[in-house]
Every structure is written in structure tokens, then in C-alpha cells.
């Protein structure tokens, strides 16, 4: 187990180095965008801002300092809680991150659950029933899932299930008149459970279903295909044949002995798909008027909001690293060969 | 052989697997259905009542609730409802008492003394005093953003001799000072000072800015009960409002920050919003207005679209060419059916007709014959085709591409070639800011900042506007400074009638210089449900923010059920 801990620590160390490199890259790219510091200040404060307001703004962001020094100021701010002022919300970017990230994490968690709940059974069935009618139906469904972008799915679901059938809300995290659960983590799904505010929890869950499913459909299709391919490959291997010849029940063989080796390739893609929600959900968040981090990132890009852009990229990077570390660890637990490489 | 058989699942096993899969899918569907049914919020009386009493609208963005920084349409709409000012605008352009019961102006025109109501309480229960007014002005001027530019050149100091008297001393006479004061929103000093965070303003930290983005410190007819900067702001009527609440005003107002078309359509069709935002295309608004009970709401606003003409480069340095272009342009094609700005109104010269002090007689209609004659009289009569005209527009507004194409087609009729350049706004702003890169024509929409023609004249035609996106004229220095002086003189006239007369003369002068092609006078065009939202077009105050003064808007909660 110590080896496993070492492995995770090693991955995290690599992750921190990657983040450091990423921060330099994004910082430089954000700062070399066209426009003088005064242009940027006017963009943030409006064309009629006073000279003193412009100077205060430039001083606060150290825009007149050499680029390396600006970076050092920024790094210092990151560790002291001053992530810089957002040009859009006009407050500390850290405050924005704390406010908007949980809404997207709620989406991410729900999306992750939906992907697993649907793609694993579908992948297993398609693999075990290779080239049958059922497999073909699942294949068509997955092709559609891969081909249709999430924002199209979002609009269709919104119009059909939300507007026409009134089964789900059209926008927002909670219905009018429903107060958010007491703030602990900021994630309604978690805070509602922790504080026992089940009314808000249930309402939040109800609001999450359509945007989460919109985001999940593409990954469901992809993961289903990957799992199917792995099942098809593994069911022709010797260990499967041996277990079948020993008369193991079909269900047990599939869920216990076939699933474990087959799910490994899917997990890597699954981690990437889930963690990419943080960066790719902006259109779905826009459609469902979801007050999330991804939409915040889109607005930051469109408004040349330097500090917010850097924060969004970094937070997305951190989540990617965490997700990949978790998956690598999980894979190492599932695959004895990887575990052996780690010396566990 | 046995091994071979083992590689393929037996038919029976396949059936079992299929049954398992079906069971799993059925379980998922059932669980999801139960979740949907059980998680749908119970329609308690409270929820229904609040939903029914909520006027919901979409806006281009979520309002910025800090009176010192929020200056866009949505922010001003929220601020005008949450805060009070000393004076209040009327639909006809007059200024009437609000927090101030009366005021006097010194003979010099430099000292304004206001007497405040004694019975005004902020939303947190603190009483409003003259010191709060002083604090609000100091805060606005120190932060130097939002509408501070209306006051910074004029206000020397503000004092509070007692709790109910405020004295403004000006550095120079400012004729529209009273009009500008509608944008001085009064904050509760105690409340703001209790919520300071670290910031650049010395002992005032951030001047309460971070807190004020999501809370309010006002005394207006509505108070903020929820604010999420990426989603929406919800207001609730303030039951202790000094001017009372009206029986039909909406109890709640939900300002949703999205103009995403499919979302707006779904929300409007299901009546979850009763008024759309003004950023939908006319065809979308038209489609939405065909919903049962819906209609189009078209409100003139003090905003105009200009094709600003560069007078420093050929061929637009010729007055004849500029005039010819103005007469060759087909205005009806732009605002008429199928035009890129369908639903907008005809412009009348340099100042929007929605603004008091505008000159209503400065209109032009397309006349190609006359335009050709003007070209013939110009110094470019023989070689106009050798001088292509550059037309720059921002790609942020797709309809402007169509405007550019239409303009080019019209100019071709009089022999002028047009090179169209679509640019991102930042690039366009940078190009307009430099004489060497400024185009012949720049397409820009400008809004008035206060409720007088002088606002637009000061913004666009004074020397301080040179090098900003407010002008693309590059007049020679003597003409520019002459015009600037005339505008400064006009805005320093205290008598409103005389001031407006001076504005009209300046407008005529600018019109005669053919500095712009006046494309249209803007309107807020929205879809709404007149049976639910009762708006009297005659009583609307066509000033940013005050258009949506919810206390004066009737809301039929019964129709919402």
C-alpha cells in the first residue's frame, strides 16, 4: 500500500510541475493579447472611467511591470488569496471561483454518475450480444450520441421534456421560492444531504437531470463503444473460456470476471470525459442558464478577462490532474500487472 | 470442440443476459421516473404565490448591483428600482423631487442646496440622512467608474450642514446637473461601511464593492433578495417604501441574465418570463409575439446608430461626397420589413428624437438623382471610382454586416466603391483611436448618458471624444475646438428652454457638416404578454434604467395562474 501512496504522490508531484508550466503559458498568452494597459482598463471600467480609476486599476494588476515580475506578483497573489480582479464581475477572481465552481461540480458529479449508469450496462450487453439485433440497436444509439453535439441535445431536451411535457425545469439550479441548502461546500447535491434539506436536494437533483444528461450523452456513446470492444476481446480469451467451461453462470461471468478487465480502457477515457465537463459545459450552461464555472470561463474569454481566464484554465488543469490520478490509481487496483509495476 | 462452443454464449445464456439488461434498463427508467415525479417540487401555496407574483424578464447580462460601477442596461434597471436619487425623471424630460423635497440654485449657478425628506428608511431600517448623500457622491467620484464622469468635471465638494440638507458646490456651471443627478443613487453609509473588504481605496478598502455586487444598501421601492452574478437577480417590493407600494406593481421581479435564443423562446412560450430581452432578432420577437396573448413592445430609447464619416481622408474629406452618401443611402431598407434593424425608428439628425432638446427637423430620405448631382459637383467628379471608401463595422453585431452590404449597394449607384471590413470590437476601437488607421466610415451605436441632447453632443463632438470610439470625424483642430466651445457654452446655460434652443442650433450645424449618416433611432423591441404586464407607453421614462421602473408597471398575478 505504501507503494500506492508513493505512486499517487509521484503523480501529484508531476501534476504540480505541469500546473506550474501551464500557469506560465496561460499567463504569458493572456498578457500578450493586443491592447495597452490603458485599453484594458477602459475595457474593464468603461470608456468614461476617470484617469485615477484607470491608474488604480493598472497598479492593482501591475500591468506596467515587466512580464516576469507580473507573473511573480500573480503567483504571490495565488497563495495569499488575491487572485486578481475579474474585469467582468469586478471582484476577486477567487470569490468567483468559490461561487461558480460548485454549480459546475454538481453538474460534473451528476454527469459522471449518468455516464457510468448507462454506458456500463450498454457496453456489457453490446459486447456479450455481439452482432445481434440488440448490439446493432445499441450501435445506432451510440453513433447518434457521438454525432450529436451536447448543445443540440440540450436544446432538444429543453424544448421536449422541459417545454412541451413540463417534466423538467427549463433553466436554473432551483425553482423560484426554493431556497438553496445552507452553504457548506456550495454543491447543492452535497449540502442538501449534509444539512438534511431534502426539499432543496430533490429540487436541485430535478434541475440537474437535463443538463447532466445533455453532457453525458456523448461520453455514454464513447464509453459504451470502448467497453463493448474490450468485452468482445476479453470474452474470447482463455480465462473466459475456462470459466465458461466450468459452467459459471452467465451473469456472474459477465459482471464479475469479464467486467473487471474490460472496464480498464474505458476508465481512462471516462476520466478525461468527466473532467472535461468543467471546460466544455459552457454551451449547456448557457442554454440552461446554469450559473457555472464553464460559462464564467466563456464570458472571461469573450471579455478578455485576464485573471479570470488564467484561473479558469488552472482550475480545469487541477481537476484534470486529480481525475487522472484517481483513474490511474483505480486502474492499478483493478489491473494486477500495473499494480505489480508499482511494486505493490 | 467443447472449447469452441464455449467461446460463444449459448442461446439460453444470451436470453438471460438480455433479460438482465432489460431489467437494468427498466430499473433505471423506473428510478428516473420516480425521481422526476417525487423531485418535482410540491406546489405549495407559497411557491405558487411567489411564482405568480413574479415578473420575470431576460436581460443581456446579470445586473451589476453596485451604483458606482453598474452602467449597462440591466444594471441600471436594477439600480433605478433598488436605490433612490435626489430627483426623478419624468416621461416628458422634466425633473421632479424624489428624496429631495425641494432645492435652490445660487445666482452664480454654482451652489445647489437640496432639502431631504425626513421619512426615508433604507432597506435595513437605517434612516436616510444628508451624510449618506455626501458619502454616495464621494464614493462615486473616488471610484471614478460608472456615471462618475457626469459629475467629476463639475463637482467641487458636497457637504451636509445638517441631517436634512445637502449642498453641492460646482467648479463650473453645469446646465444639465439636475438631469445628471438621477444617476446619483444614495447608499446607506453604515451598511456599506460594515461590509468593507481589502481594496485600493485606503481606509475604505474596496468601498464595499464586492458586497454590493450581490446585496443592496438602498431605499428604493425594491430590495435585492437573491443575486448570482452568472444567473439572475431577484427583487422583492420594499413594504416600507417612503412613497408607498402600488397595488398592481409586481411583488417580485426576476432579472435573468441570458439572451440565448432557444432558452428565451422556451421560457417565453411557457410564460416563465413575461417580457423578453431586447437583443433577440426582430424575426424572433415577431414569432414570439404570435403566442396567444403576446404582443410586441417597442419603446423609443435615446440611442442612435451612426455611420461616422472621416473628414480627413479622400474622398470623404469632400462635403459634397459626404452629403451625396447621405442621400444615396436607403434608410427604409434598413429598418423596414426584412431589414437588418427592422423595428427601429427613423433618425432625425445628430441626437435621438427620444431626447429632450433634440431637433426633430433634421431628416433625410434617399434621393439617388440628387446624390449623383452632388458627386458631379464635388472635386472627385471625374475620378470618384478611384477612391474606394472603407466601411468598418463590428462583427459582434451580425446585423451590421447586412447594413454594410446594403450601404455598399447604395453607394455603387453613385459610383462609389465600398470596401467592407468587419472587425472584432477591440480592433475596431483601436483603429478608430488612431488617425492613420481610422476608416472612411465607422458604424457605431451611441446611447445618451443623461436625459438631454447635451449628453450626446458632449459625448461625441467635443475634443475629448477625439481618438475614442465616440467619433471618427478627425475634424481639423480649429473646427473641433469651435464645436467643443459651442457645446460647452450650451451645457452651461441654466435656463432649460434657452439651453435646448442652443442644442438645436448645434445639431443643425453638425447636420450641415454631414459628419454622419444617421441610420436609425433605436427602440427597445421586446415580446411581452400585455394581459400580464401592463405598461403604458405614454408614461414610460425613456432613460436607461428608468424605462423599467417596476413600481409604475402593472402586473396581473391572476393571469399568471
Image (tube, helix red, strand yellow):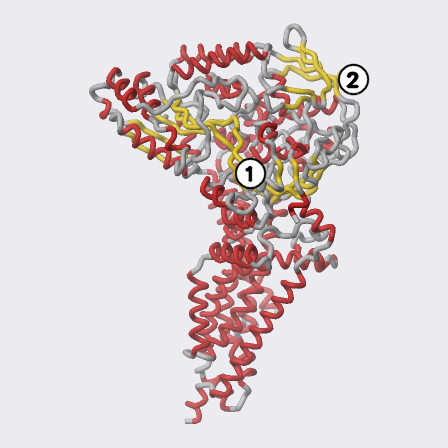
Q: Is residue B218 left or right of residue A261?
A: right
Residue A147 found in image quarter: bottom left
Q: Is residue A204 above or below residue B450?
A: below
Chain under numbered label 2 = B
Disc 1 secondary structure class: loop
Q: Is residue A20 above or below residue A120?
A: above
x then y, percent, for residue B333: 37, 32
Residue B92 found in image quarter: top right
Numbered circle sitting on residue A88: 1
Q: Is residue A243 left or right of residue B402?
A: right
Label 1: how many residues lie within 10 Å, few (<14), some (14-19) or many (20+)? many
x then y, percent, for residue B344: 46, 32
Inspect this view and state whether residue B314 appears: no
Disc 2 secondary structure class: strand
Numbered circle sitting on residue B162: 2
Q: Single out the residue that lies furthest toward the bottom.
A: B1
Amino acid at each position: 500500500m505504501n507503494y500506492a501512496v508513493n505512486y499517487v504522490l509521484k503523480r501529484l508531484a508531476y501534476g504540480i510541475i505541469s500546473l506550474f508550466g501551464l500557469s506560465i503559458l496561460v499567463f504569458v498568452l493572456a498578457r500578450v493579447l493586443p491592447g495597452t494597459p490603458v485599453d484594458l482598463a477602459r475595457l474593464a471600467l468603461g470608456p468614461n472611467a476617470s484617469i485615477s480609476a484607470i491608474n488604480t486599476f493598472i497598479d492593482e494588476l501591475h500591468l506596467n511591470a515587466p512580464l516576469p515580475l507580473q507573473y511573480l506578483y500573480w503567483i504571490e497573489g495565488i497563495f495569499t488569496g488575491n487572485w486578481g480582479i475579474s474585469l467582468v464581475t469586478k471582484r476577486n477572481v477567487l470569490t468567483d471561483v468559490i461561487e461558480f465552481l460548485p454549480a459546475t461540480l454538481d453538474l460534473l458529479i451528476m454527469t459522471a454518475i449518468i455516464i457510468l449508469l448507462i454506458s456500463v450496462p450498454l457496453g456489457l450487453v453490446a459486447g456479450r450480444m455481439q452482432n445481434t439485433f440488440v448490439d446493432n440497436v445499441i450501435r445506432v444509439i451510440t453513433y447518434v450520441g457521438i454525432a450529436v453535439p451536447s448543445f443540440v441535445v440540450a436544446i432538444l431536451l429543453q424544448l421536449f421534456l422541459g417545454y412541451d411535457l413540463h417534466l423538467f425545469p427549463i433553466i436554473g439550479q432551483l425553482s423560484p421560492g426554493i431556497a438553496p441548502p445552507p452553504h457548506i461546500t456550495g454543491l447543492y447535491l452535497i449540502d442538501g444531504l449534509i444539512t438534511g434539506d431534502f426539499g432543496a436536494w430533490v429540487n436541485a437533483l430535478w434541475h440537474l437531470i437535463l443538463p447532466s444528461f445533455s453532457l453525458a450523452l456523448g461520453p455514454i456513446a464513447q464509453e459504451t463503444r470502448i467497453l463493448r470492444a474490450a468485452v468482445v476481446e476479453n470474452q474470447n480469451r482463455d480465462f473466459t473460456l475456462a470459466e465458461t467451461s466450468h459452467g459459471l453462470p452467465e451473469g456472474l461471468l459477465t459482471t464479475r470476471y469479464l467486467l473487471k478487465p474490460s472496464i480498464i480502457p474505458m476508465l481512462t477515457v471516462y476520466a478525461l470525459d468527466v473532467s472535461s465537463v468543467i471546460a466544455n459545459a459552457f454551451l449547456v450552461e448557457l442554454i440552461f442558464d446554469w450559473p457555472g464555472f464553464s460559462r464564467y470561463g466563456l464570458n472571461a474569454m469573450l471579455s478578455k478577462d485576464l485573471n479570470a481566464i488564467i484561473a479558469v484554465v488552472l482550475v480545469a488543469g487541477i481537476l484534470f490532474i486529480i481525475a487522472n490520478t484517481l483513474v490511474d490509481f483505480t486502474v492499478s487496483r483493478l489491473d494486477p500487472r500495473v499494480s505489480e509495476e508499482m511494486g505493490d | 470442440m467443447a472449447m469452441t462452443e464455449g467461446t460463444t454464449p449459448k442461446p439460453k445464456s444470451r436470453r438471460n443476459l438480455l433479460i438482465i439488461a432489460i431489467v437494468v434498463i427498466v430499473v433505471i427508467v423506473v428510478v428516473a421516473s420516480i425521481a422526476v415525479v417525487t423531485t418535482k417540487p410540491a406546489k405549495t401555496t407559497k411557491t405558487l404565490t411567489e411564482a405568480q407574483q413574479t415578473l420575470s424578464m431576460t436581460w443581456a447580462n446579470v445586473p451589476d448591483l453596485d451604483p458606482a460601477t453598474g452602467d449597462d442596461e440591466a444594471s441600471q434597471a436594477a439600480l433605478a428600482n433598488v436605490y433612490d436619487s435626489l430627483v426623478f425623471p419624468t416621461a416628458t424630460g422634466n425633473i421632479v423631487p424624489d428624496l429631495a423635497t425641494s432645492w435652490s440654485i445660487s445666482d452664480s449657478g454654482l451652489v445647489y442646496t437640496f432639502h431631504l425628506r425626513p421619512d426615508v428608511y433604507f432597506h435595513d431600517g437605517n434612516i436616510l440622512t444628508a451624510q449618506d448623500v455626501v458619502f454616495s457622491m464621494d464614493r462615486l467620484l473616488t471610484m471614478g467608474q460608472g456615471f462618475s464622469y457626469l459629475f467629476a468635471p463639475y463637482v467641487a465638494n458636497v457637504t451636509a450642514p445638517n441631517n436634512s440638507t445637502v449642498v453641492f458646490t460646482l467648479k463650473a456651471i453645469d446646465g444639465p446637473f439636475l438631469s445628471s443627478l438621477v444617476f446619483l443613487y444614495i447608499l446607506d453609509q453604515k451598511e456599506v461601511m460594515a461590509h468593507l473588504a481589502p481594496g485600493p481605496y485606503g481606509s475604505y478598502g474596496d468601498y464595499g464593492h464586492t458586497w454590493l455586487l450581490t446585496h443592496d444598501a438602498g431605499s428604493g421601492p425594491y430590495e435585492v433578495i437573491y443575486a448570482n452574478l452568472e444567473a439572475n437577480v431577484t427583487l422583492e417590493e420594499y413594504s416600507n417604501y417612503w412613497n408607498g407600494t402600488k397595488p398592481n406593481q409586481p411583488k417580485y421581479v426576476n432579472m435573468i441574465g441570458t439572451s440565448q435564443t432557444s432558452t428565451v423562446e422556451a421560457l417565453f412560450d411557457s410564460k416563465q418570463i413575461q417580457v423578453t430581452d431586447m437583443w433577440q432578432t426582430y424575426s424572433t420577437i415577431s414569432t414570439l409575439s404570435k403566442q396567444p396573448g403576446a404582443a410586441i413592445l417597442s419603446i423609443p430609447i435615446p440611442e442612435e446608430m451612426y455611420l461616422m464619416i472621416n473628414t480627413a481622408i479622400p474622398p470623404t474629406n469632400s462635403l459634397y461626397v459626404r452629403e451625396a452618401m447621405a442621400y444615396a443611402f436607403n434608410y427604409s431598407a434598413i429598418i423596414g420589413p426584412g431589414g437588418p434593424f427592422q423595428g427601429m425608428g427613423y433618425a432625425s439628425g445628430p441626437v435621438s428624437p427620444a431626447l429632450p432638446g433634440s431637433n426633430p427637423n433634421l431628416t433625410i430620405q434617399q434621393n439617388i438623382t440628387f446624390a449623383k448631382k452632388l458627386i458631379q459637383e464635388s472635386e472627385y467628379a471625374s475620378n470618384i471610382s478611384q477612391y474606394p471608401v472603407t466601411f468598418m463595422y463590428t462583427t459582434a453585431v451580425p446585423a451590421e454586416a447586412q447594413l454594410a452590404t446594403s450601404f455598399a449597394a447604395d453607394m455603387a449607384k453613385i459610383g462609389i466603391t465600398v470596401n467592407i471590413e468587419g472587425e472584432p470590437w477591440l480592433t475596431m476601437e483601436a483603429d478608430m483611436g488612431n488617425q492613420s488607421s481610422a476608416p472612411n466610415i465607422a458604424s457605431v451605436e451611441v446611447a445618451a448618458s443623461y436625459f438631454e441632447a447635451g449628453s450626446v453632443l458632449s459625448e461625441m463632438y467635443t475634443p475629448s471624444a477625439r481618438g475614442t470610439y465616440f467619433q471618427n470625424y478627425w475634424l481639423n483642430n480649429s473646427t473641433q475646438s469651435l464645436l467643443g466651445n459651442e457645446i460647452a457654452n450650451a451645457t452651461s446655460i441654466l435656463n432649460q428652454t434657452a439651453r435646448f434652443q442652443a442644442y438645436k442650433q448645434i445639431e443643425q450645424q453638425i447636420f450641415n457638416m454631414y459628419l454622419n449618416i444617421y441610420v436609425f433611432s433605436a427602440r427597445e423591441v421586446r415580446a411581452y404578454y400585455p394581459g400580464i404586464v401592463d405598461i403604458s407607453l405614454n408614461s414610460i421614462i425613456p432613460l436607461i434604467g428608468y424605462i423599467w421602473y417596476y413600481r409604475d408597471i402593472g402586473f396581473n398575478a391572476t393571469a399568471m395562474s
